């Protein structure tokens, strides 16, 4: 399910990145790769703010919707 469908403070694990090589490389450079856990901190209507290993990352909705995740339970 796309990360854009989750709520603030939800913890998720990346299962897949959709898009061309340029998008996958950009997200990989930001630390968003398959298996990585991240927390959705905030959505301001335009950008999503994620917390990944203590770092805050902002992504536009167009890019964020390409990140397919599963919820981390527990």
Image (tube, rainbow, N blue to C red):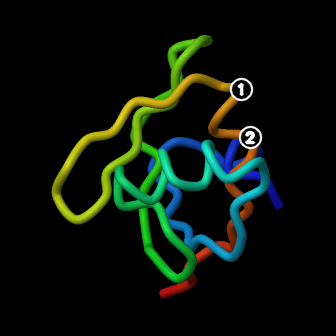
31 and 58: which is toward the camera: 31
x 42%, y 62%: residue: 38
For this view, does 4 lie left or right of residue 28?
right
Residue 29 locus on image (x, y percent):
36, 54
Which quadrant holds residue 45? top right
How many marks can you see? 2
Q: Which residue is denoted by mark 2 in the rendering?
A: 65
x 16%, y 57%: residue: 54
- The residue carrying pointer 2 sits among few (fewer than 14), some (14 to 19) or many (20 or more) residues within 10 Å by Cα, namely some
x 19%, y 50%: residue: 55
Q: Is residue 17 above or below residue 60?
A: below
Q: Is residue 51 above or below residue 71?
A: above
Q: Quadrant of the N terminus?
A: bottom right
Please identify the residue farthest to the top as the structure is shown: 45
For this view, does 5 lie left or right of residue 24?
right
Q: Is residue 18 above or below residue 4?
A: below
Which quadrant holds residue 42? top left
Please identify the residue farthest to the right as the structure is shown: 1
For this view, does 2 lie left or right of residue 23?
right
Q: Which residue is denoted by mark 1 in the rendering?
A: 62
15 and 28: which is toward the camera: 28
- Element marked by disc 2: loop
x 42%, y 56%: residue: 39
Tell me whether circle 1 and circle 2 mark residues in contact (CB < 8 Å): yes
């Amino acid at each position: 399910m796309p990360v854009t469908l989750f709520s603030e403070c939800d913890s998720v694990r990346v299962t897949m990145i959709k898009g061309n090589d340029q998008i996958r490389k950009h997200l990989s450079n930001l630390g968003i790769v398959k298996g990585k856990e991240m927390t959705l901190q905030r959505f301001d209507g335009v950008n999503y703010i994620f917390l990944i290993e203590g770092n805050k990352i902002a992504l536009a909705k167009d890019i964020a919707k390409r990140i397919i995740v599963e919820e981390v339970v527990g």
